[in-house]
Image: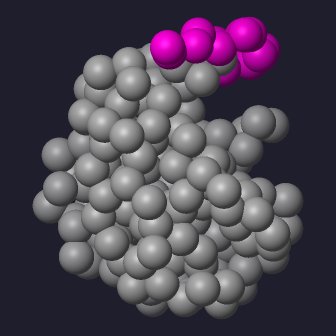
C-alpha cells in the first residue's frame, strides 16, 4: 500500500520531538516508520529539519517552526500533489488540514483520514474542513483506510482499541 503521511509545517518530524505543537509531528514520524516496517511504501511530508523515518521517503515543505500556516501546510499539496494523488491513503496530521481539503476538492471520493490534536479545531479555517470528525478524531471512508488503521491497533468497524502488532 502506498501511504502519504502529512506532518505539517509547524515543526520538524522526528522521534524526539517534544513540546507544544510537536506531538503530532512526532506521531507522524512514528506512524511512517511503523508502516514502512510492515513493508508499505510510505511518503512523509514534513518541515525542514525532519528526520527520515527508517524505510520511508521524506518530502520537505517550508517550515514555520511553531506558527500555524495554511499556506505552508498547503505547499505539501502544491509541491507534491501529483505524488499525493497516487497514494492509496493520505493521513493528514497537520493543524490546518489544508492537504486533505485540497485533495477533497480534487476528488471528493479520495481516501483520506486525519488526526487532530486537542485545540487544533480552533484554527480560523477549521470551519471550512470537508472532512467529518468522528469520536476518535478520524474520518474513515474506505476499506483501505480501515486496513491502514489496523496497523496501529485501531479497529474502525468496532471503534475499539486492540494491542498493535510490534515489528521487530
Q: Which residues are magenta?
A: 154-168
Q: Is residue 15 visible?
A: yes
Verify whether residue 70 appears in magenta.
no
Q: Is residue 17 left or right of residue 109?
A: right
Quarter of the image for residue 23 reads: bottom right
Tell me which residue sits at (46%, 67%) in the image. Answer: 50
Whether residue 147 sits left or right of residue 165 in the image: it is: left
Front residue (pair 134, 152): 152
Q: Count the marks: how many?
A: 0
Quadrant placement of the N terminus: top left
Secondary structure mainly formed by the magenta segment:
loop
**Drawn side of residue 137 relative to residue 131, left or right:** right
Q: Residue at x 25, y 34 (%)?
A: 41
Q: Is residue 129 shown above or below 142?
A: below
Image location of residue 111, percent across then percent down: 38, 39
Q: Nearer the viewer, residue 50 or 115?
A: 50
Residue 47 lies in quadrant: bottom left
Looking at the rendering, which quadrant does residue 54 occupy?
Answer: top left
Residue 163 in the magenta stretch? The answer is yes
Q: Nearer the viewer, residue 33 or 44?
A: 33
Furthest-right residue in view?
118
Q: Is residue 24 visible?
A: no
Q: Residue at x 22, y 65 (%)?
A: 81
* Residue 166 on image: x %, y %: 58, 13
Residue at horizontal 31 percent and vertical 43 percent from the top: 56
Judging from the image, the colouring scheme is one colour
Expressed as whole percent of the image width and height from the top left, the position of residue 123 reads 73, 79
Indicate left or right for 16 with 86 as reference: right
Eyeballing the image, is 109 above or below 108?
Answer: above
Q: Residue 153: x, y in percent?
A: 65, 17
Amino acid at each position: 500500500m502506498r501511504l502519504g503521511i502529512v506532518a505539517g509545517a509547524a515543526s520538524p518530524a522526528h522521534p524526539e520531538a517534544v513540546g507544544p505543537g510537536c506531538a503530532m509531528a512526532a506521531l507522524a514520524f512514528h506512524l511512517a516508520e511503523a508502516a514502512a516496517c510492515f513493508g508499505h511504501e510510505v511518503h512523509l511530508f514534513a518541515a525542514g529539519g525532519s528526520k527520515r523515518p527508517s524505510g520511508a521517503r521524506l518530502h520537505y515543505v517550508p517550515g514555520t517552526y511553531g506558527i500555524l500556516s495554511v499556506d505552508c501546510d498547503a505547499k505539501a499539496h502544491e509541491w507534491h500533489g501529483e505524488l499525493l494523488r497516487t497514494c492509496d491513503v493520505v493521513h493528514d496530521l497537520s493543524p490546518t488540514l489544508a492537504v486533505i481539503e485540497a485533495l477533497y476538492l480534487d476528488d471528493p471520493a479520495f481516501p483520506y483520514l486525519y488526526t487532530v490534536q486537542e485545540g487544533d479545531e480552533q484554527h480560523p479555517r477549521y470551519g471550512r474542513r470537508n472532512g467529518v470528525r468522528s469520536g476518535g478524531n478520524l474520518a474513515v471512508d474506505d476499506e483501505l483506510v480501515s486496513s491502514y488503521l489496523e496497523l496501529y491497533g485501531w479497529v474502525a468497524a468496532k471503534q475499539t482499541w486492540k494491542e498493535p502488532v510490534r515489528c521487530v
